[in-house]
Image (cartoon, helix red, strand yellow):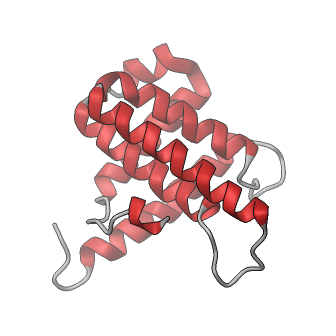
Amino acid sequence: MPYLIPSRTPLTPEQVKRGFDYLLALQTGGGTYAAGRVEATPELAFVMLRLVENIIWPVTALDEAADLCADSFLLNEVGCVLLSALRDWARDSPTTAVPGIARSIIRFVENVIPNPDDHGDTCATLEAMRDEHLALAHVAHSAPGAHR
């Protein structure tokens, strides 16, 4: 259901860095450690929500070029439900949503996204994802007429 993911202005490199800093702090040291490093604010809730959309939606959305089966539609719906619930949480309580959205991203990465170095290190996967998202953010914000 692509209508659930509206087109939007890409995150800035600073937002990407802040979001992944929080994810990596939470992954390596837990909630107290992350809270001491990056404050959970409504703006960070927005960033985390954008990251979760950019990470979960491409994996769960229907790929019309692929061979579709019942599981394809089920995965699509699970992705829609998860994103909808996280959006509601971020809207209703942004600062308490930050750690929950971050934990959802970490759990999704641990259980669904293949590890690039095949060593089962979620931090390495998150770091690789951070680098990819930073590169995309730099391209999007350095292009002529880009949002700044």
Residue visible at 62% across and 59% down? 76
Residue visible at 19% across and 86% down? 144
Residue visible at 68% across and 55% down? 75
Locate residue 98: give its quadrant. top left
The reply, left or right, for residue 44 in relation to residue 67 is left
Spot occupied by residue 73 in the image (x, y as percentages of width and height): 68, 62
User: Quarter of the image containing the C terminus?
Assistant: bottom left
Residues 102 and 35: in front is 102
What residue occupies the far top of the structure in this picture? 32
Q: Is 96 drawn above or below residue 11 in the view shown?
A: above
Residue visible at 83% across and 47% down? 119
- In this rendering, the count of numbered labels is 0
Locate residue 129: give its quadrant. bottom right
Q: Is 62 drawn above or below residue 91 in the view shown?
A: below
Spot occupied by residue 63 in the image (x, y as percentages of width and height): 64, 75
The reply, left or right, for residue 58 in relation to residue 96 is right
Spot occupied by residue 145 in the image (x, y as percentages of width and height): 16, 83
Spot occupied by residue 37 in the image (x, y as percentages of width and height): 38, 25
Q: Is 2 drawn above or below residue 108 in the view shown?
A: below
What residue occupies the far right of the structure in this picture? 118
